[in-house]
Image (cartoon, helix red, strand yellow):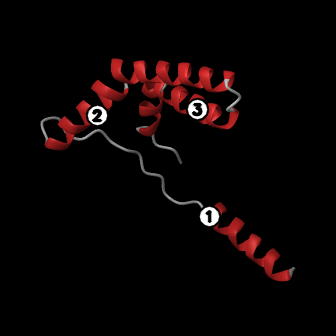
Amino acid sequence: MKKINVAVFAVLTILLIQTSAYAMATPAAGSFAYDLYDIAVNKILTGPIGFVAGVACMVLAAVMAIRQMLVPAVSVVLGGAFLLSADTVVTTLGSVII
């Protein structure tokens, strides 16, 4: 029992140590990385493709819930909610959290 208590205390101590936080920054305009970022994030994830995928996930989750497949339906709802609020998530990834 002592070993378990020591292990739990060690894990909690490691989790409570404050470290530096880094935010994802948008690449410089004109670079190859910016072109990839623009296509992947601005045009696909936060664009119409991401919105349609989010709505499709919600419809799929409703069908799964009707079929009594509740555990997969919950995960699909979470994924669909992520896709529908992708613009907020992308903005949050760029903010510095301390």
Q: Which mark is residue 17?
A: 1
Vertical comparison of 95 with 10: above or below: above
Q: Which mark is residue 41?
A: none
Vertical comparison of 42 with 30: above or below: above
Q: Which mark is residue 78?
A: 3
Q: State the quadrant of the N terminus.
A: bottom right
Q: Which three-letter amino acid code belongs to the residue tagged 2?
A: Ala
> Is 5 left or right of 52, judged from the image as shown?
right
Instruction: Give the mark, 3 or 2, whose residue is nearer the N terminus.
Output: 2
Instruction: Give the mark, 1 or 3, whose residue is nearer the N terminus.
Output: 1
Q: Which of the 4 image quarters holds residue 12?
A: bottom right
Vertical comparison of 73 with 17: above or below: above
Whole-percent x, y for residue 81 in the image: 54, 26
Whole-percent x, y for residue 30 in the image: 12, 36
Q: Which mark is residue 40?
A: 2
CA gap, disc 3 and disc 2: 20 Å
Extreme residue in the right direction: 1
Q: Which three-letter amino acid code belongs to the residue tagged 3?
A: Leu
